[in-house]
Amino acid sequence: MTDKIKLGISTCLLGQPVRYDGGHKWDRFLTDTLGNYVDFVPVCPEVECGLGIPREAMHLVGDPAEPRLVTIRSGVDHTERMLNWARRRVVELEKEDLCGFIFKSKSPSSGMERVKVYGPAGSAANTGVGLFARAFMDHFPLLPVEEEGRLHDPKLRENFIEAIFTLKRWREMLHLQQGRGALVDFHTCHKLLLRAHSLEHLRQMGKLVAQAPSLAVSELYARYQNLLLEALARKTTTRKNTDVLYHLMGHFKKDLSADEKQELREIIDQYHRGLVPLIVPVTLINHYVRKYDEPYLKGQWYLHPHPIELQLRNHV
Ligand code: SF4
């Protein structure tokens, strides 16, 4: 890829002292590891909408579907200020070509889910969404989004990062060339990756690509992009990966010896049973791809969807 992935992020996660108390919530994985592949576009809704540092802490109150953003001690309502700013900011962010957003969890402005919303009696329900996060997700409904806390879960982390790398490749293709042939090439080398997310979407995308000659290029791309983003939002699972691994194995029917087939079957089964991480069968398959010179599989992004240094497939 020619340049880094652009990702929106809650500013305090970068270690910038923008929190209400002048503190931050620096996440080292994001800056020191993911940051090697990503250009972050920081957004701090509370500072950018004009509230200073330090400022009075706020929380959400009222109806969880349409909560108010109110300061905790003095009860000042900043809802309109925040919503007016957020409406403008999401339009500005269209120019950034973001491949996703990482939100700070639990924040009444930036939290993506399960933010506390206080009722009149002072009791709280964990059912809210931060006001800026809501505006962002409404404006970019299919863009990959996550919270820093959820990214500590290895499976969610792998899914999110795979989605942003795939979206980056899609965007890059859009910038370089737009034609039916380019889309067919993109689809061909993402087939197994898509299958690991959603077989149903892979089938729909296959049908769409088959109709390509009869569709206007703009319509073809728009429909394909929607299906791509929907597919990436479906999480991979051990079962889906196992299906892809057996599918991959089928490509070597004529190449592998009985002993090699047995070994690969055993390793896929060990992965399926949670005894070894995904990287183990994938490494063995990559070895066979090289050994038996399988051109179709060499091009499959499923076998190398993100840099190995991120170690995203090393967990069981
Ligand atoms: S959680 Fe959001 S609003 Fe609060 S400091 Fe971080 S970026 Fe700013």
Image (cartoon, grey):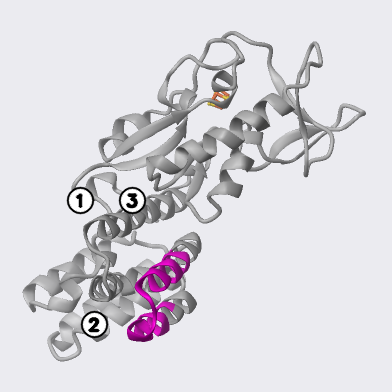
Viewer-side label of 1, 2: 1
Q: Residue at 47%, 75% (x, y): give it.
A: 201
Residue 28 percent coordinates (x, y): 37, 28
Residue 115 percent coordinates (x, y): 69, 36
Viewer-side label of 3, 2: 3
Q: Could you give the CA–CA distance between mark 3 and mark 1, rounded to whole angstroms?
A: 19 Å
Residue 221 painted magenta: yes
Residue 140 percent coordinates (x, y): 53, 50
Q: Residue at 78%, 21% (x, y): give it.
A: 77
- Please determine whether, in this image, residue 77 is positioned above or below residue 66: above
* Sequence-earlier tag: 3 or 1: 1
Look at mark 2 in the image and give the residue it sits on: 262
* Label 3 secondary element: loop
* Sequence-earlier tag: 3 or 2: 2
Q: Residue at 77%, 17% (x, y): give it.
A: 72
- Please determine whether, in this image, residue 50 is positioned above or below residue 101: above
Q: Residues within 10 Å of mark 1 (few under 14, many from 20)?
A: few
Look at mark 3 in the image and give the residue it sits on: 312
In the rendered structure, which segment of residues is drawn in magenta? 205-228
Residues at badges 1 and 2 in contact (C-beta under 8 Å)?
A: no
Residue 108 located left or right of residue 144? right
Residue reaching furthest to the front: 216
Q: Residue at 46%, 69% (x, y): give it.
A: 227
What is the magenta segment's predominant secondary structure? helix
Q: Residues within 10 Å of mark 3 (few under 14, many from 20)?
A: many
* Label 1 secondary element: loop
Residue reaching furthest to the right: 121
| Disc sitting over residue 1 in the figure | 1
